[in-house]
Amino acid sequence: MLNIVEIIRESFVHHIVFSAGLLLIVGYLFGQLAEKAKLPAITGYIFAGILIGSSGLKFIRHENMHMLNIVSEITLSFIAMIIGGEFSFYKLRIYGKKVILLTVSQMFLTFALVSAGLILLNLPVYVSFLLGAIGAATAPAATVVIVEKLKVKGEFVDYLYGIVALDDAGTVILFSIAFALSTSIIGEVNVNFGISIIHAFLEIFYSLIIGIIGGFLIHFASSKKRNINEIKIITLGILFLTTSISISLELSPLITNMTAGMLIINLSKKNIKILSSLQPLTPPLYAIFFAVAGAELSLSIFKDSTVLIAGLTFIILRAFGKYFGIYFSATSLKASENVKKYLGLGLLPQAGVAIGLVLFVQASPIIEQASAAIHLEIDKMINIVLMSVFFNELFGPPLAKYAILKSIKRRN
């Protein structure tokens, strides 16, 4: 067995196409096993990535992981546009105010609980604030895949999509405030608080502008086309452009493509064919996206007892913040029992946004100028987030699936 593994490593793993094919096949097999165990296929994809990634058989080289992340960017763009496509103005008139209040409530309660809990564990205040803000982030990918797989619609899903969409923009603002506060607490560097907040709003504003331009371009170029293949080519081309422009300008491709999707669906009801044209492409993208996420996870983070305790505290308090933030605000808003009891469970998955934010901290010139002691704390913070992502990507999707299924049963 060991000889076969070594032969594969030496002969094939250098090739990016081999890596992609392996992730798809093993991801598919594990996805099937997960569904037989009544778990979302996502969980199987992640386990497949762990098995063949750096924590398992090491069949995916580091340089190939970097190239495979391009697939992740494309997949997130698809997901963002699909979420945006659920934001019709009709739904916004019905749920808009409630969705905003629910989003803000769960974000701030999560931030407060995680920050306070980690401070009580004697983590530095600036690290606790940053982790509190990162804890507010939710993973839209898992939510969309589960909803599409179950083929469900209705009030619960509208609320879920709405909060997931707004959570990204809200988290960017909250994180920027926390980052400005944290760097001022460190005391080794000077950061203008007002400039940090303005930068956060400008990031969202420019992302919206690019999304609006992309949405109009897709609409005018595709609305009169009848050939679905032509629509697909035009939509993909513009989607790739808006994504690459957002990433190159260090903006949010999620906000950009959510905006494009929302604009497309509201410019004409006929534009549903544009979003539908993307559906056949999504299954393999989802499979490789979550398998790559699993391959990037390292089990070595569980060796440090301080990280383990802080990570468990982070995971538990984040879950409390998400669930009870929704529960209490939904109660005050007199939302339905489905929303009140189950919506918080649908917000537990956590992945790309959280990792992106913590890597932003690590790569920031402000932190690079800090002392070795601060770098050590930042490394610990990264491991806490990775541990949370590991846990929430494995157990978050089954809980989200449970919540969606329970909401259907209660409605019926």
Image: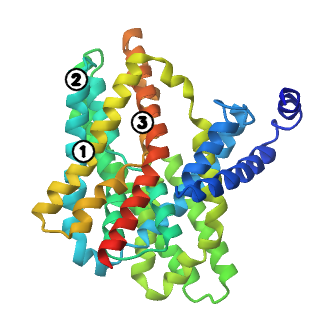
Q: Earlier in the sequence, mark 3 or mark 2?
A: 2
Q: Which mark is residue 321?
A: 1
160 relative to 57 in the view: left or right = left
Spatial CA distance of label 1 from label 2 is: 16 Å
283 relative to 259 in the view: left or right = right
Compared to 249, does 315 lie above or below?
Answer: above
378 relative to 59 in the view: left or right = left
Q: Which mark is residue 388?
A: 3
Amino acid bearing label 3: Ser
Quadrant of the image occupied by residue 108: top left
**Residue 101: where, in percent of width, then height?**
18, 59
Residue 140 visible in the shown view: yes
**Residue neighbourhood size for the residue with mark 2, other residues' Cα within 10 Å, grouped as few (<14), some (14–19), many (≥20):** some
Q: Earlier in the sequence, mark 3 or mark 1?
A: 1
**Residue 22: where, in percent of width, then height?**
76, 47
Amino acid bearing label 2: Ile
User: What residue is shown at x 44% (from left), y 74% (from top)?
Assistant: 152
Q: Earlier in the sequence, mark 1 or mark 2?
A: 2
Q: Secondary structure under badge 1?
A: helix
Compared to 225, does 365 lie above or below?
Answer: above
Q: Secondary structure under badge 2?
A: helix
